[in-house]
Amino acid sequence: MKGIFFLLFIPYLVSSQSNDVLKIRGKKPIELLNNDGLFFPGRYKGKLLEYSKDDISNNIQGGILFYIKRSKDTVRISSNQNYKLKLNYNLSLFFRELNKKSWNRLEMGLNFGDGMAFSHIYLAKGIYNKKVLNSGIGTGILTIDRINFIPIFINSSYDIFPSNSLEISRYKFFTYNSIGYSFAEDFRNDYISVGGGLYWNIGLGIKKSLRRTNISVKGGYLLQKYKSEYDRWWWDMIFFDPNQNVSDNITRREGNYKRFILSFTVTF
């Protein structure tokens, strides 16, 4: 698709008081969709009236319907033609997708369970592509019961409401999933030994667009596999685990931490 949209979030009817801009690229005129005439390269001010996407399954070609202020005429251009479109609209009313091929994400938050809360921080990198659910890879550090887990994971997200980019909304709801493997470290020497394993985090979130970033709050379920050994008797009073095995004054634990996780993220 040669047509490039500066903004992916485009309403079906744009009620902007300022002018939208259509720029036909190249040196030769292009043939118009459903029109016998030609459209010459240049910059045109007007208003976007309609926008549609390609639908391969139904053999439907996408395009735009644009009103040109100068000639007081309306043109329809197909999505495979060489043009740029820039919309002017009220940022407070519309969700603005980042005009990038890839994203970077900083996430900070807490995980809760058994009456205690611990923190985590992650960094991730990915691509904008809904066919692969905006997938990426990340790492960071997660603390539970004084065990420091360092997960390496792949993650993905998908907008569930408004799922159609023609909807008008300041916010978007999304679902996300992260799965990987965590290495375990004991930086404070509270344990004899620690081990990690499967890391899985799934949940829902809500995001809002700013000028150059998206911010979001999300919550979900966290599962982290672990095992540990320690010989301090008071640990049994503080962190009771039904999976533990006590012998020779050494307490051994192995199982899965199941936690509720709440995070704040910045995507840029």
Image (cartoon, helix red, strand yellow):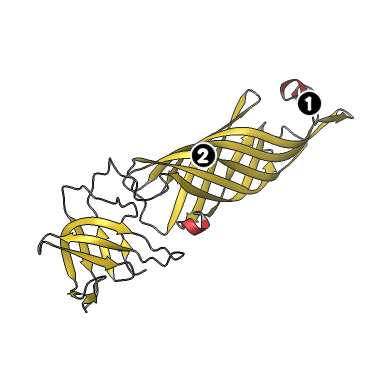
Indicate the secondary structure of the residue bearing disc 1: loop
Is 193 drawn above or below residue 7 in the view shown? above
> Residue 248 in the image: x percent, y percent?
90, 30
Q: Quadrant of the N terminus?
A: bottom left
Q: How much space separates mark 1 and mark 2, taking CA atoms?
A: 39 Å
Which residue is tagged 1? 232
Question: What label sits on residue 204 in the rendered view?
Answer: 2
Residue 4 placement: quadrant: bottom left
Image spot of residue 129 (x, y percent): 46, 58
Q: Residues within 10 Å of mark 1 (few under 14, many from 20)?
A: few
Residue that protrudes farthest toward the bottom in the picture? 28
Count how many numbered circles sit on residues in the image: 2
Q: Residue at x 37, y 52 (%)?
A: 98
Q: Of marks 1 and 2, which one's residue comes earlier in the chain?
A: 2
Residue at 66%, 34% in the rendered image = 258
Task: Please indicate whether residue 121 sits to the left or right of residue 168 in the image.
Answer: right
* Residue drawn at the location 63% of the way across and 22% of the way down: 115
Up the image or down, 245 lies above or below 203; here it is: above
Disc 1 marks a residue whose amino acid type is Arg
